[in-house]
């Protein structure tokens, strides 16, 4: 069964608009972490934001925020004031448990294109 | 922030050649590193978890004799693709995580492997 689901293969957004990238997850472990990574065409994986399952507040990092809906098991990424440089693949990932040695499971990814 | 260095970034070689890829954590100790494989337009698939001083843990379907992993120190893990064939052509990317809870995995820049 798919543990991480990203239902949007591609998104097209006008520059300066906000965009929400969807991510739902499935786990029976009460302790887990959710991550978003950005992968430009050059291939590197850039860490954007993290949300722990016990965190009370939604995570924010600059223009990135994570809309964490625990009961719905969703962890959508919101990018405010989008820029041309935001065009990339975006991956949602989950780690069960809080140990750094635990593996990440990735979603299928969403290709975001920002139009000028 | 944490830096992971991966080398080489690009390899083209003949079928039957063995190729070694290095992954180094530059400013932190990584008892665990991860090796992923990514086909074009697809997500990252975990191949194996590399544990310092012990044998790697391979994911189901990954041939351990084909993809040799060595993690001899807290800052270096290597992946050797033995007797590579065209179907082994892919993007290989490593990651490492610090020890603390909530630590994200930091990725190397990846290696594009093309087997002729």
Image (cartoon, coloured by chain):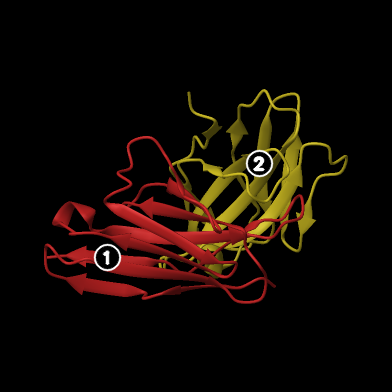
In the image, the chain rendered in red is B
Chain designation of label 1: B
Q: Which residue is mark 2?
A: A76
Q: Residue at x 45, y 41 (%)?
A: A108
Quick check: do tags 1 and 2 share a chain? no
Q: In the rendered structure, are the residues bearing label 1 and label 2 in contact, judged by CB atoms less than 8 Å apart?
A: no
Query: Is residue A58 left or right of B79 when viewed as pictured?
Result: right
Query: Is residue B111 left or right of B1 when viewed as pictured?
Result: left
**Which quadrant of the structure image shows residue A28?**
top right
Q: Position of residue A17 (x, y in %)?
A: 63, 56
- Which of B22/B86 is in front? B22
Which colour denotes chain A? Answer: yellow
Q: On the rendered image, what quadrant is the C terminus of chain B found in?
A: bottom left
Q: Residue at x 88, y 39 (%)?
A: A56
Q: Position of residue B58 (x, y in %)?
A: 42, 43
- Which of B93/A35 is in front? B93
Q: Which residue is mark 1?
A: B113
Q: Is residue A113 above or below residue A98?
A: below
Chain designation of label 2: A
Task: From the image, state whether disc 1 or disc 2 is nearer to you.
Answer: 1
- Which of A64/B34 is in front? B34
């Amino acid at each position: 069964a798919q543990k991480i689901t990203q239902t949007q293969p591609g998104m097209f957004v006008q520059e300066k608009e906000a965009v929400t990238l969807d991510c739902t997850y499935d786990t029976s472990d009460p302790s887990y972490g959710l991550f978003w990574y950005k992968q430009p065409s050059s291939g590197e994986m850039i860490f954007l934001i993290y949300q722990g399952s016990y965190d009370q507040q939604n995570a924010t990092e600059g223009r990135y925020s994570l809309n964490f809906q625990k009961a719905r098991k969703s962890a959508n990424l919101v990018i405010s004031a989008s820029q041309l440089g935001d065009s990339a693949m975006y991956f949602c990932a989950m780690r069960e448990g809080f140990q750094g040695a635990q593996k990440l499971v990735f979603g299928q990814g969403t290709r975001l294109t920002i139009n000028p | 922030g944490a830096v992971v260095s991966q080398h080489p970034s690009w390899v083209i070689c003949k079928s039957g050649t063995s190729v070694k890829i290095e992954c180094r954590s530059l400013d932190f100790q990584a008892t665990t590193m991860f090796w992923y494989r990514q086909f074009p337009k697809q997500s990252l698939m975990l191949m194996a978890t590399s544990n310092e001083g012990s044998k790697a843990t391979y994911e189901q379907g990954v041939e351990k004799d084909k993809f040799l992993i060595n993690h001899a120190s807290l800052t270096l893990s290597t992946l050797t693709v033995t007797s590579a064939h065209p179907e082994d052509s892919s993007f290989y990317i490593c990651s490492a995580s610090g020890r603390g809870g909530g630590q994200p995995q930091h990725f190397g820049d990846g290696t594009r492997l093309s087997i002729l």
